[in-house]
Amino acid sequence: MIEVADLHKRYAQAKQEAVAGVSFEVAEGEVFGLLGPNGAGKTTTIGTMTTRVRPTSGRVVVDGIDVVADPVAAKLRIAVVPQRPNLDRSLNALENLTFHAAYFGFGRRERNRRAREMLERFGLEGRGDDRVDNYSGGMAQRLIIARALMHDPRVLFLDEPTTGLDPQSRLFLWDQMEALKARGVTLLLTTHDMAEADRLCDRIAIVDHGKVIASDTPRGLRKLLPGAEGLELTLAADADPVDALRTLGGEVESEAAGEGTWKLRAYGEIAPGAAIGAAEAAGARVLDLRRIEGTLEDVFVHMTGRDLR
Ligand SMILES: Nc1ncnc2c1ncn2[C@@H]1O[C@H](COP(=O)(O)OP(=O)(O)OP(=O)(O)O)[C@@H](O)[C@H]1O
Ligand SMILES: [Mg+2]
């Protein structure tokens, strides 16, 4: 549904490229995440896919349409929730929705029907006549997403859609995104919330300094860090049972945890049953077993470093 190939963007007068050779593909119905530090080039990359930014070079195809060659056709198929709110402050909330639908060619009745349905769906019923200036930040964000959905886009681009939202609104938006995915809408989102990316995205590209530095499923990315996956066992035994767990194949660490007990960490993709079996075969008793799971945040910081951008 989206194909970006060797995309470059250098803004006028900029010393460095904002996007320096980015390539990725997104399949229909996928949720694809673009992660990266501030200034990595995420918004610029989204800008090229949504016709707002003209690429310096490279290919950007959305739903079979070359976005640079035919921006008008591309715009009919996509919708954007931009990083910065861009509601029309001279219009009320309902008008923001209906004007958008008019732009996409919907007749009056249909525009009004859709707008009211969207206000209700996004918890804004009864607030359609409010000036959007009087909306709170979170309400405005919900209205922007409602507006994006007015014309039933096939692809939805969301640039940090949950930044600044309360936990309720964030959960609500996650539900909305999952519902859109279930209906076959393709989603491309950016976020600085690694737990959110882990939960929502089928695949993720981590970008830094305008380049993709890693791309995989959330789980695949988490496994990039050594020691990100494994089991931690607390065992009671007469002697350190570390050798028993070595038979499982991975790296094993052991530390004494008081009288006759040891805490062992066995790294790798190890089945809990196999670990328990190995420990018991060596005469140890399993007091506790838990999974070791690295977070996407660990991987992100490992890959992009700690320097401010
Ligand atoms: N209109 C513009 N003109 C000149 N430079 C720009 C423009 N927009 C972005 N840039 C520069 O391009 C680089 C990438 O910016 P971009 O907004 O794409 O980053 P981002 O990954 O979205 O960051 P953030 O997480 O802070 O939103 C930055 O160095 C930025 O200063
Ligand atoms: Mg941005």
Image (cartoon, helix red, strand yellow):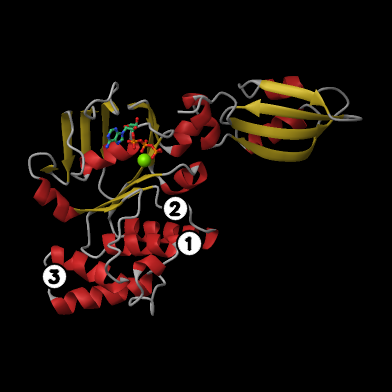
Establish whether ligand 1 lies closer than 8 Å to the Cβ of label 2.
no
Which one is in front, 261 or 89? 89
Find disc 1 in the rendering and name its residue: 169
Give the vertical position of 109 relative to 231 (above or below).
below
Q: Which kind of residue does numbered mark 3 sit on?
A: Phe
**Residue at left offset 14%, top offset 55%:** 76
Dot 3 corresponds to which residue? Answer: 106
Which corner quadrant holds the N terminus? top left
How far across and down, in percent of the image, does residue 199 sit?
47, 48
Whether the residue carrying mark 3 lies under 8 Å from ligand 2 is answered with no
Tell me the residue that label 2 is attached to: 162
Is there CB contact under 8 Å for labels 2 and 1? Answer: yes
How far apart are labels 1 and 3 at the CA level? 29 Å
Q: Quadrant of the C terminus?
A: top left
Whereabouts is ligand 2, in terms of quadrant?
Answer: top left
Q: Residue at x 68, y 22 (%)?
A: 252
Q: Residue at x 45, y 61 (%)?
A: 138
- At label 2, the amino acid type is Thr
Among the 4 quarters of the image, the one containing residue 149: bottom left
